Every structure is written in C-alpha cells, then in structure tokens.
C-alpha cells in the first residue's frame, strides 16, 4: 500500500445529524448485544483486541477540539516507568497477543524520546500483533520515519492544517522518503480509508489531511469547542469499547476508553495487578454490566458520547475477514439471503475484494454507485439490483451509511430487520 493521502473529515465539522447518530446508535445496539452477550456469561473473559499504551501524557499541538491540547491539558505530566512498559509488553508476549497495539493514546508519541526503542521492542516481542501509531508529525524527520515504518504495520500522520497543506516537518520527511513512501507516487484515498491492514509486507503510511479548526466528536463530553453545546444527542445503545479495548495511562492505571482523555473512570492498576487480572477484574466487569444492561445513561462522559463502533480498531485482515465471514454465513443462512457484495467500486473496495478472496470470503461483486464499467475481475451490480437480490453487503465505513440507509428505507428495507449491511469498523 505504501503512502496514501486522505481528507478524513473534509471541509465540514464532524458534527453528525441526530438522524445519522440515531442510526449508528441502533446498529451499535445490535452489534454490541451480538458480540458481548457471550462475553459476559463466559467463565473467562476473552482478551481485548486493541491495546493503547500511553507512554507519556502530553501533546505539542493546540487543536481546539481536543482536551489534551497543550493549552487545555489538566493532566499531571507523566512518563511511564520503563520497567512497567517492558513488563506490560512481556505479559502480552506471554498471552500470545495478536490484536492491535499502539504506543500512544491521548498524546503525541514522538514527545517521548524512548518511543522508537519501545516500538522496536514491542514489534520484536509481539510479531503477530498489528502495530499502529498516530502522530501529528510535528517532530517527524527522516530518521524517525524510517525507524517507525520498519517496525509498524500502520502509521497514520494526522497533518493538521486549515488549508489541507502538508506541515513543513511532514513535507520534508516525505520528500526524501524512499519507495514505497515516495511522495510523488502517493495514492489519494477519498473518504475514510478502510482500517484493515491491506499489505502484509510493508507499513501502510496514511497522511490524514485534517483541518485544525473543526468541531469533531464530543470525546466523552470533554471536547473544549463542544462542551457548552446544547441539544446533545443521547445514545441508548451500549458501547463496544469496554469489550474490546484496553487503555493504559503512563502511571499504570487503565482508563475506560480512548475517548476519555482525562480518565473519568479508572478501570484498574497495572502496578498492582497483571494485565489479565485488570481486564477480568471487578471494575471492568461492573462497567461492562452497567453499559450492557443500562446503556450509557448512568456513566459520566458516556451519557452524551457520540462515538459508535471502534474507530481506531485496525483488525488484521485475517480478523476482519473471519469476522465478516462468520456474520455473512449466519445472515445468509438465517435470512436465506442470496449473495454478498462489497460496497462501492473504489480502489479500497477492490483491494478488499481480492484480499478477502484469498482469505476464503468470495464476494459476488462490488456495488456500483458511480456508474463505472464492470469487468470480469471485479463483477459489479447497481444498488437496486443488489437490494432486489436481497444480498448481504459489506460497507467498509459507516460514513457511507446515511445515503444508503435512505435508499434502503425507501425500498422498504430496515437494517435491524434485514441485516443487509455490515460496517466492519462497527463490529
Ligand atoms: S460510551 Fe463513549 S466514553 Fe463511554 S466507554 Fe464508550 S466510547 Fe468511551
């Protein structure tokens, strides 16, 4: 995959309409109940699938939407003890951890001078995990870039500039980067990129061109430029995060999720308990039960949370394919649906089409919403035919969902009744 550019959040605020939030809320309710009911009744709790280890808790940027921006940060500055860091990685090794791992959470990881050696150690100890990192790129240079891509599967550079220009450090770094990260051959990906790792051999480097002055998610009601907003959406669904993700702060405590930058709720302490003890411990289980049975309404920060799915969840392609196949098999069997399709004819969808095929998921085709010519490599059908065929459909991102829902609803289809759409970053 090499290097790609996206304008993830485009020109507008990511201030979703209540209509779309309501739909995402309903999808999430179905997905979480489906996923978490076994989880709660299991003798032993399944391990998390994403872990973020924040080795320092500072950022050097001043984005107005972020409570961790350098002008707003109320956290006590802290760097993680090395002994604790190595102990966590070694425990993950002993667990044969193969989910996703990132050595950052609500911070800028390059502010920690030890980050390159930490990333290298994590890679060596956890060869089967998917290693990813987000950076704002301010401290990036050629040397750090090559050390990172050597040890990561996915590097996301959040390049903040109101005119969508590369900031000087990112431009300088990428202008001297070797193939396949050569800036002149970078692909431009429109819309949100799929989060699955598309290449097994090289690091996927994605530069997200993002405006700094935007209103984004509420971040557990902590976002500085949305804190005073009236008429906030109140979700009714439970949330998938406590079942899939562990967040470790530099002092060794664990937080409820990556959308809780100021740690409203502590779920455990890795100074006194092992990773598994914390994950299976009382605080986490109480939190899970509360959110599963009563939704978000009684939990500080969660009550207005406009986050659905697990946006930063970057499954390995194998995991994504296996999850999709299981769900597609179940739905096609239960509902007697005829075929499975992947939405849209973008390069991203085509890559998924091929990669999933290698992994045993045979899509019948791509959904052609752009009037593109179909060919034998990528058979396609228009949305009307796919619906008429009552096909099961993979939509690689929920942000397509609004238009599609309108169409499906007009055609008499209901997501919750027919299970026609699976957005694989909501799972
Ligand atoms: S509802 Fe929001 S704040 Fe609460 S755990 Fe989920 S993502 Fe985090």
Image: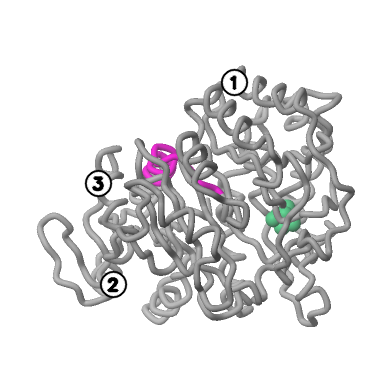
| Mark positioned earlier in the residue sequence (3 or 2) | 3
User: In the rendering, at what x and y percent does residue 240 appear?
Assistant: 64, 50
Q: Residue furthest left?
A: 376
Mark 3 closeness class: few <14, some 14–19, many ≥20 residues within 10 Å: some
Residue drawn 48% across and 61% down?
171
Q: CA distance from mark 1 to mark 3?
A: 33 Å
Colouring mode (rainbow / by chain / secondary structure / one colour): one colour
Q: Nearer the viewer, residue 195 or 358?
A: 195
- Badge 1 element: helix
Query: What predominant SS class does the magenta segment belong to?
Result: helix
Q: Nearer the viewer, residue 288 or 176?
A: 176
Q: Is residue 346 visible?
A: yes
Q: Nearer the viewer, mark 1 or mark 3?
A: 1
Residue drawn 72% across and 74% down?
233
- Badge 3 element: loop
- 3 and 2 marks in contact (CB < 8 Å): no
Q: Which residue is mark 1?
A: 93
Which region shows up in magenta?
A: 313-325
Q: Which residue is mark 2?
A: 383
Q: Nearer the viewer, residue 294 or 25?
A: 25
- 1 and 3 marks in contact (CB < 8 Å): no
Mark 2 closeness class: few <14, some 14–19, many ≥20 residues within 10 Å: many
Q: CA distance from mark 3 to mark 2?
A: 18 Å
Q: Which residue is mark 3?
A: 362
- The answer to whether residue 303 is left or right of residue 89 is right
């Amino acid at each position: 995959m090499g290097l790609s550019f996206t304008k993830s959040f485009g020109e507008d605020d990511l201030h979703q309409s209540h209509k779309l939030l309501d739909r995402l809320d309903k999808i999430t309710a179905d997905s979480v109940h489906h996923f978490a009911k076994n989880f709660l009744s299991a003798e032993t709790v399944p391990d998390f699938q994403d872990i973020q280890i924040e080795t320092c808790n500072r950022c050097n940027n001043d984005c107005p939407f972020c409570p961790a921006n350098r002008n707003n940060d109320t956290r006590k500055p802290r760097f993680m003890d090395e002994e604790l860091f190595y102990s966590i990685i070694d425990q993950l090794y002993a667990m044969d951890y193969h989910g996703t791992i990132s050595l950052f959470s609500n911070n800028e990881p390059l502010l920690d001078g030890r980050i390159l050696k930490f990333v290298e150690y994590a890679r060596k100890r956890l060869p089967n995990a998917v290693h990813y990192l987000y950076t704002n790129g301010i401290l990036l240079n050629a040397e750090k870039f090559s050390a990172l891509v050597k040890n990561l599967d996915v590097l996301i550079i959040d390049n903040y500039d109101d005119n969508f220009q590369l900031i000087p450090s990112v431009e300088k770094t990428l202008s001297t980067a070797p193939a396949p990260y050569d800036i002149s051959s970078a692909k431009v990906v429109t819309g949100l990129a799929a989060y699955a790792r598309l290449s097994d051999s090289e690091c996927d480097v994605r530069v997200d061109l993002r405006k700094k002055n935007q209103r984004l998610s509420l971040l557990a009601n902590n976002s500085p430029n949305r804190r005073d907003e009236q008429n906030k959406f109140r979700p009714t669904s439970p949330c998938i995060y406590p079942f899939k993700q562990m967040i470790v702060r530099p002092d060794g405590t664990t937080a409820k999720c990556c959308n809780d930058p100021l740690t409203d709720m502590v779920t455990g302490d890795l100074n006194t308990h092992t990773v598994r003890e914390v994950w299976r411990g009382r605080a986490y289980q109480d939190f899970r039960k509360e959110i599963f049975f009563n939704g978000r309404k009684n939990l500080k920060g969660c009550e207005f949370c406009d986050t659905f799915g697990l946006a930063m969840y970057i499954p390995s392609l194998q995991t994504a394919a296996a999850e999709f196949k299981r769900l597609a098999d179940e739905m096609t069997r239960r509902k007697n649906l005829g075929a499975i399709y992947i939405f849209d004819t973008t390069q991203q969808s085509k890559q998924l089409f091929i990669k999933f095929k290698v992994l045993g998921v045979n899509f019948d085709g791509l959904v052609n919403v752009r009037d593109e010519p179909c060919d034998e490599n990528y058979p396609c059908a228009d949305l009307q035919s796919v619906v008429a065929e009552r096909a099961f459909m993979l939509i690689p991102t929920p942000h397509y969902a609004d238009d599609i829902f309108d169409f499906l609803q007009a055609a008499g289809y209901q997501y919750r009744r027919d299970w026609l759409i699976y957005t694989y970053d909501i799972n």
